[in-house]
Image (spheres, rainbow, N blue to C red):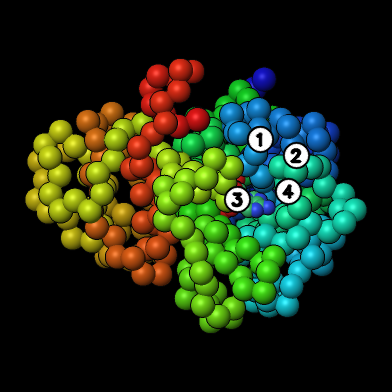
Amino acid sequence: MTTTRLSFDMAGVRDAARLINEGALVAFATETVYGLGADARSDAACAAIFEAKGRPRFNPLIVHVTGLEDAQRYGVFSPAALRLAETFWPGPLTLVAPRRDGARLSWLATAGLDTVALRAPAHPAARALLAAADAPIAAPSANRSGAVSPTTADHVLGDLGGRIAAVLDAGPCDVGLESTIIEATGPEPRLLRAGGLARGPIEAVAGSLSGPQPPGAGAPLRPTSPGQLASHYAPQAQMRLNVATPRADEAFLAFGEAPPLPATAAVRNLSDAGDLQEAARRLFADLRALDAAKPASIAVAPIPNEGLGEAINDRLRRAAAPRPVTSADATGRPK
Ligand code: TXA
Ligand code: MG
């Protein structure tokens, strides 16, 4: 299969929507990362997502919708969930709600769970595609399972080119980190995954949040959320975190003012100015670029754990976590 790059214009959106309606896989830009979309009502289309990504079937997908009204056809919203959706949608927030009885969604999309993860994305390309396809769109990040999420169409084509029908290219993603996931099935909303919407504004609406568990804590075999797998979002190279001065054979991911480094070193600075929003936007592209230089390891400068820093540090810890080695994959890359 050749993967078509569609531009974000009327014809591109029309073609992307037609492919979704035919049950094909189409990656598309959202404000967080590129998603790998399929009609969330179709078993065959959802199964194809797991196949293309090499994703374990017990890991449920986020269902993308145009807004709250649409979302309520699939999930039952508690008062807290309603407040969060009304405040932050469309945007980088995913809400896990009880699945509505009779909801027309493939059980593969929710991995057989009685809950459903719902998100109304803000990016105009995602919104145009949802409107034109007139369907709920199941979409994980458009990367091979375990790898770093894509923030450009080129990243998507590098990972999934030849395995999916098309990518709707709308340039680099603005936020750069996956959505924040809040479980709102009980009276107290719980943070399942730190992400592109920082904890502060959410707590201002929902009160203080419990969670998430640090990676590896209990490391459940059957995670109820994503990156609950300790190793996730991982480049090929090993990672060392909180490094002030890298070794000579290492690549360096700096933040703010960088130490003097050998001219030959592969270096990226997440933000010269020490701005966490800029760092979030650049994180995955910079990790991919450093990884491509095939260094002995990637050393990462300390990142403050405030605001979006919480999600950045979460992704870095998972990228640095010990990798499961399977017989099927002797490189140690997580599956
Ligand atoms: O920003 C994002 O969230 C991107 C864009 C494309 O929207 N999507 C994304 O999807 O990051 P993914 O599949 O890479 O991560 C979503 C995670 C899954 O790993 C899954 O564990 C969790 O959401 N999830 C989905 N349904 C769930 C549920 N019912 N309960 C708990 N966690 C759930
Ligand atoms: Mg993902």
Evaluate whether residue 17 shows in this view: no
Q: Does the beta carbon of the residue at mark 2 sit less than 8 Å from ligand 1?
A: no
Residues marked 1 and 2 touching at CB (< 8 Å): yes
Q: Earlier in the sequence, mark 1 or mark 2?
A: 1
Left or right: 82 in relation to 162: right
Q: Which residue is mark 3?
A: 224
Please tell me how crowded label 2 is: few (under 14), some (14-19), or many (20+) other residues with Cα within 10 Å: many
Q: Residue at x 75, y 65 (%)?
A: 67
Q: Which residue is mark 2?
A: 108
Q: Does the beta carbon of the residue at mark 3 sit less than 8 Å from ligand 1?
A: yes
Residues marked 4 and 3 touching at CB (< 8 Å): no
The CA span between labels 2 and 3 is: 15 Å
Q: Earlier in the sequence, mark 4 or mark 2?
A: 2
Q: Earlier in the sequence, mark 4 or mark 3?
A: 4
**Callout 1 secondary element:** loop
Q: Position of residue 76 (x, y in %)?
A: 79, 65
**Callout 2 secondary element:** loop
Q: Residue at x 62, y 73 (%)?
A: 188
Tag 3: amino acid: Thr
Q: Which residue is mark 4?
A: 113
Tag 4: amino acid: Leu
